[in-house]
Image (tube, helix red, strand yellow):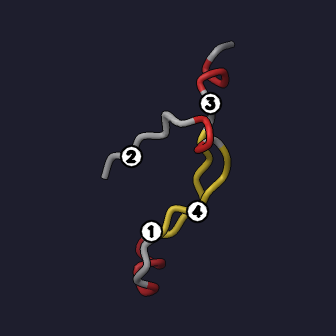
Amino acid sequence: MMMSFADDAQVGRFVYHCHILKHEDNGLMAPIEVWGPEALIR
């Protein structure tokens, strides 16, 4: 699945998850962190 995180309101820490609880053990529940474009400038 491909998702767009172009909106500034979507920057931060979230939990990627599936609503079928037995899928949690197969990697369908994990923390993700979305950074804004300024994080790429060094």
Residue 18 figure quarter? bottom left
- Of mark 4 and mark 1, the one earlier in the sequence is 4
Q: Amino acid at mark 4?
A: Val
- Of mark 3 and mark 2, the one earlier in the sequence is 2
Report how far apart the C-alphas of labels 3 and 2 lie in the structure: 15 Å
Q: Residue at x 58, y 44 (%)?
A: 10
Q: Which residue is mark 2?
A: 3
- Of mark 1 and mark 3, the one earlier in the sequence is 1
Q: Which residue is mark 4?
A: 15
- Of mark 3 and mark 4, the one earlier in the sequence is 4
Furthest residue toward bottom: 22
Determine contact: label 3, label 4, CB under 8 Å.
no
Seen in the image, is 22 located left or right of residue 29? left
Determine contact: label 3, label 2, CB under 8 Å.
no
Q: Which mark is residue 27?
A: 1
Q: Position of residue 5 (x, y in %)?
A: 49, 39
Q: Amino acid at mark 2?
A: Met
Q: Amino acid at mark 3?
A: Gly
Q: Residue at x 61, y 57 (%)?
A: 14
In the rendered image, the vertical position of residue 42 relative to residue 6, given as above or below: above
Determine contact: label 1, label 3, CB under 8 Å.
no
Report how far apart the C-alphas of labels 4 and 2 lie in the structure: 14 Å
